[in-house]
Amino acid sequence: MTTTSNASERPLRADAARNREKILAAAATVFAARGLDVVFDDIAVAADVGVATVYRRFPDKDSLVWALFENAIDEIADLVRHANEMANSWDGFVWFLEEALGRLCANRGLREVIMGAPYAEERMMAAKTRLVPAMMALVERAQRDGFLRPDVVEADIPVLELMISSLSGGANDVAPDLWRRYLRIMLDGLMTERRAPSTLPPSPPEAVVIEAIRASRCGSASRTSESSPVAPEVPTS
Amino acid sequence: MTTTSNASERPLRADAARNREKILAAAATVFAARGLDVVFDDIAVAADVGVATVYRRFPDKDSLVWALFENAIDEIADLVRHANEMANSWDGFVWFLEEALGRLCANRGLREVIMGAPYAEERMMAAKTRLVPAMMALVERAQRDGFLRPDVVEADIPVLELMISSLSGGANDVAPDLWRRYLRIMLDGLMTERRAPSTLPPSPPEAVVIEAIRASRCGSASRTSESSPVAPEVPTS
DNA sequence: AGTTAAGTGGAACGACCTACTCCAGATATC
DNA sequence: GATATCTGGAGTAGGTCGTTCCACTTAACT
């Protein structure tokens, strides 16, 4: 799925290349489940290699993060582009938010890099600014067609994404689609007038769900199993 | 403002009582600005006493947190009660959210305890469940009057509060009212139909603001001044 | 098959950080 | 002025995290 060994630099021995992939896969899982603030040791045991191997392949977390999430922004850029090509501009707007949030909510690491975690910062930032024009187009098109309220600006979008994705992570395990409920509310607040009488998609949050969200919000009792299997990249439709 | 020495247990020497108050005041400031995850040492220097004094008065963080935020929930209960007594149920609903979020966004520590930080957990939890009926009444009244969409439940309220207050903390210094913008959007999505053509209150987020939110979201470059003066309790109208 | 360069694991190290205590000296109280 | 109370801040013990070192294994090439 991710970069096979870059042939331009040096051949990298067969087993080493294999290990590199194991590390990347393990890191993807661990990052997705627990965010970027995990120690190299955890990645090593998840990949079933020694720590030194991880360090040898990826001298710092920046390079590992970058190797994993280099394409993430471009994928989002593709989403925006595709959304801009949809016939109905509001449908495009909604579709983009659903797709982006699906990814962001399912992958805590992705959320953190995109929201500005201090890891591959400059590179991520650069990639992000490249995305702004397309986002502006998306917003303005929906506004021009009279769907999206005119007092919204492009800069609101990441903030909205940040807010909505902030409750996932804890709710992931117990109610992975909860974010859709609040996205629906936000969308109803974002459009110029209610068109159809929309209903909130996932069932209202149970007490358990709220509890899970809370528990995640602070490093309290989360030291049960370190091999929590989590959907790796694109689990939402 | 906060508990003067509890006369029922033991008189506590004059200087000791004075120090206790200094500690509470300092902790309030520090907690509000940097959340509950501060070391006792920081509170001690802010209070201008030794660490031992802090430990002597408050053996663990739970007792300090509880001493500071014991009334917080009751204050919120008062808000709900007052909101329920307002003539217009929708206005009451909106007023409550504004008041509650104003407090939550201005005080990071408050936000953390209420949202379930692992400190005075059981006690806070107990206090919170006592609040549920009034919240249900608030929601149901607004629904009965046809203002609030019927598919919202009481459990949605804390989630909404959590989401909206999640972006404050970083934005506090640079745009302390930004949350109002997104509350407006959420409210427009929560009501059954748009009544007046509402406009989003605070100006759209500048790049600086977004940057500040991001920076706060991860402990990166936040080691400048530890004496950041922050509004202590109830700064929003 | 043997030589060699590349790769490996995991113990070990040092630089933090954080919670908490100890006690000689200061201070209120009567 | 006697004494019980309180104080500060140095000191400790314990934990975490990033990183390296080196005796050993393994692939690659002849």
Image: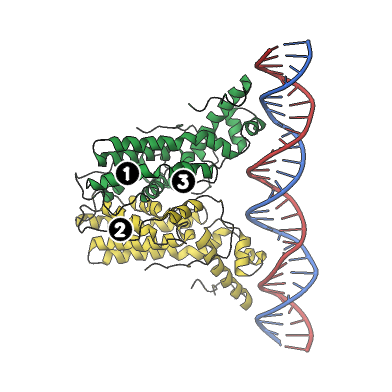
Chain colours: A yellow, B green, C red, D blue
Give, as a three-letter code, the residue at label 3. Answer: Met
Q: Is residue B154 left or right of residue B213?
A: left
Give the residue pinned by disc 1.
B137
Q: Are marks 3 and 2 on the same chain?
A: no
Parent chain of label 3: B
> For the residues marked 1 and 2, what is the alpha-carbon distance in whole angstroms?
21 Å
Quickly name the residue at label 2.
Answer: A200
Q: Residues within 10 Å of mark 2 (few under 14, many from 20)?
A: some
Task: Report the amino acid beneath label 2.
Answer: Leu
Residues packed near mark 3 inside 10 Å, few (<14), some (14 to 19) or many (20 plus): many
Gap between marks 1 and 3 measured at Cα: 21 Å
Q: Which mark is residue B115?
A: 3
Q: Is residue B97 visible?
A: yes
Which sits in the foreground, A179 or B66? B66
The type of residue carrying mark 1 is: Ala
What is the chain letter for disc 1?
B
Nearer to us in this view, B210 or D14 = D14
In the image, taking residue D5 as reference, residue A236 lies left or right, namely: left
